[in-house]
Amino acid sequence: MFKMMFLFLSVLLSFSTFAGGIKSTLSRESIGDIEGILKDERTWSAPEFVAEQSYRPKVDQPLSLGVFDVKRPLPIQLTFLKKEDVGTANCRAYFLDKNFSVKEAKLFFDQHAGSKLKLLNGQLVKLKSTGGSARWCKFTDYKVLASQKELEQERQNRIAEFNSYQFEGTIKVFVARLYPSRMIMFNLTAGDITQKSLFERCDKTLTIDPPLTKSQIRATDYRKKEATVNLKIEGRKCVAKSVVFDA
């Protein structure tokens, strides 16, 4: 009896030492919160055994290394909203460090796919033995900043606002290319509109209506000269009603 207990304790101590050795190969670093749009994971809509087969390879290695505090973390993917978040830690994968069954994972994505989330209390975990090439980002919780419906409504509002924009006035520009029915702008020099707004709406191109004749084009030397343009914008429709080059 004593020998069996001694053997059991020896095995337990050996396993603890082994597990401790594995965890000692990991480095951990706080990365704060990250915002993004949650991508859908259609895997969870498959039959439960299929979903489980797809899930296991994603978590087996980090689980065996002791990366997580739970037994069934949830792998997720984000479309990042901020440039500084795109390369966050260059993580191979992102996980919510909470237990999710297959049914709970499916419900999570049914509710939040396409929503804007803030992942809270982020931590980068790296495997030292690979030179840091094996990296996982885990988060303890999340907050819904905007639902998919709210984001879609915001998008529709922006489109409606953009399409309702109107401008009519005189601008001065340098012209990069000139054709009978269109002109490509190089630079805005004057007018009651910003160059950023003008170029974003018109893509640097104005339709000329009525169009210039071929003889007018041949007679025009627009290089290094400003053109005075009577411009009308409605949404994305950008029309030059007249184009006159300075003498």
Image: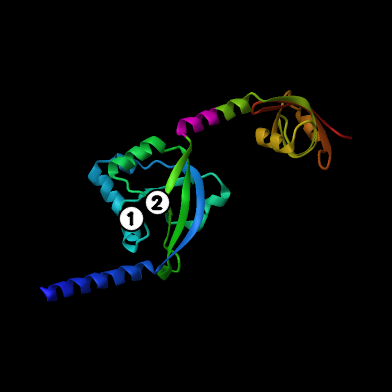
Q: Position of residue 49 (x, y in %)?
A: 23, 46
Predominant secondary structure, magenta span: helix
**Residue 105 at least partly seen:** yes
Query: Does the magenta-highlighted stretch encompass residue 68?
Result: no
Give the x, y percent position of residue 224. Answer: 83, 42
Sort mark 2 into few (<14), some (14-19) or many (20+) by Cα contacts within 10 Å. many
Q: Is residue 153 magenta?
A: yes
| Residue 186 drawn at (x, y percent) | 74, 41
Label located before the other in sequence (2 or 1): 1
**Disc 1 on helix, strand or loop?**
helix
Q: Residue at x 32, y 43 (%)?
A: 43
Amino acid carrying mark 1 in the image: Val
Q: Are marks 2 and 1 in contact (CB under 8 Å)?
A: yes
Q: Is residue 56 left or right of residue 93?
A: left
The disc label shown at residue 59, or none: 1
**Identity of the residue drawn at 28% across and 44% down:** 102
Residue matched to label 2 = 95
Picture quarter with the C terminus: top right
Q: Is residue 167 above or below residue 137?
A: above
Q: Which residues are magenta?
A: 147-156
Query: Depth check: 195 or 42 in front?
Result: 42
